[in-house]
Amino acid sequence: MQTPAGKECRHYYQDFHRGRNIQECRLAKVNPASERWHPNDCSKCPVPDILLANADPNMELKLTIKRGFLGFTRTLDVKAFDKRSGDPIADPYVGNLNREDNPGLEIFRRALEDNDGPSPD
């Protein structure tokens, strides 16, 4: 669904049908350590960009909204975890590249190794 900032995010939900007025970020809602979500948070949120860059179905994101200095600013902290092992993922934009059970990545590595030879010029 499209966020108030104009980006596509699967964790954002809104419902204005028949007088309802529901807007929520379901990723921030499940985290009890997070501050309450506001629609303005979507403009600074990195989650839509992470989802666009990495479509790993085994990656789980955790969003924590924190108040800044004197409550004037808000910071959005996103951490990524592997669902199967629970290990943190260092760069959520790239994902978990050291996984041995990824056949597509292994084919890509072999193709790169085959093309490392000298050119026939």
Image (cartoon, helix red, strand yellow):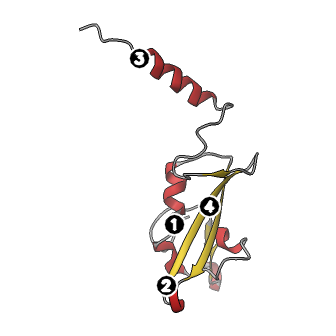
Query: Horizontal and vertical percent for residue 82?
Result: 69, 49
| Foreground tag (3 vs 1) | 3
Label for residue 79? 4
Q: Residue at x 50, y 64 (%)?
A: 46
Secondary structure, mark 1, is loop
Type of the residue with mark 1: Gln
Q: 77 or 5: which is nearer to us?
A: 77
Q: CA distance from mark 2 to mark 4?
A: 20 Å
Question: Which label's residue is closer to the chain start, 2 or 1?
Answer: 1
Secondary structure, mark 2, is loop
Query: Horizontal and vertical percent for residue 100?
Result: 67, 31
Measured along the vertical axis of the image, is residue 102 above or below residue 9? above
Label for residue 115? 3
Which image quadrant is residue 62 in? Answer: bottom right
Which image quadrant is residue 99 in? Answer: top right
Residue 118 vs residue 84: left or right? left
Question: Which label's residue is closer to the chain start, 3 or 1?
Answer: 1
| Foreground tag (4 vs 1) | 4
Furthest residue toward left: 121
Query: Horizontal and vertical percent for residue 11?
Result: 62, 64
**Residue count near mark 1 (Cα–Cα under 10 Å), binned few <14, some 14–19, many ≥20:** some
Secondary structure, mark 3, is loop
Instruction: Report which residue position mark 1 lands on.
Output: 2
Residue 60 vs residue 93: left or right? right
Q: CA distance from mark 4 to mark 3?
A: 36 Å
Label for residue 73? 2
| Foreground tag (2 vs 1) | 2
User: Which quadrant is home to the N terminus?
Assistant: bottom right
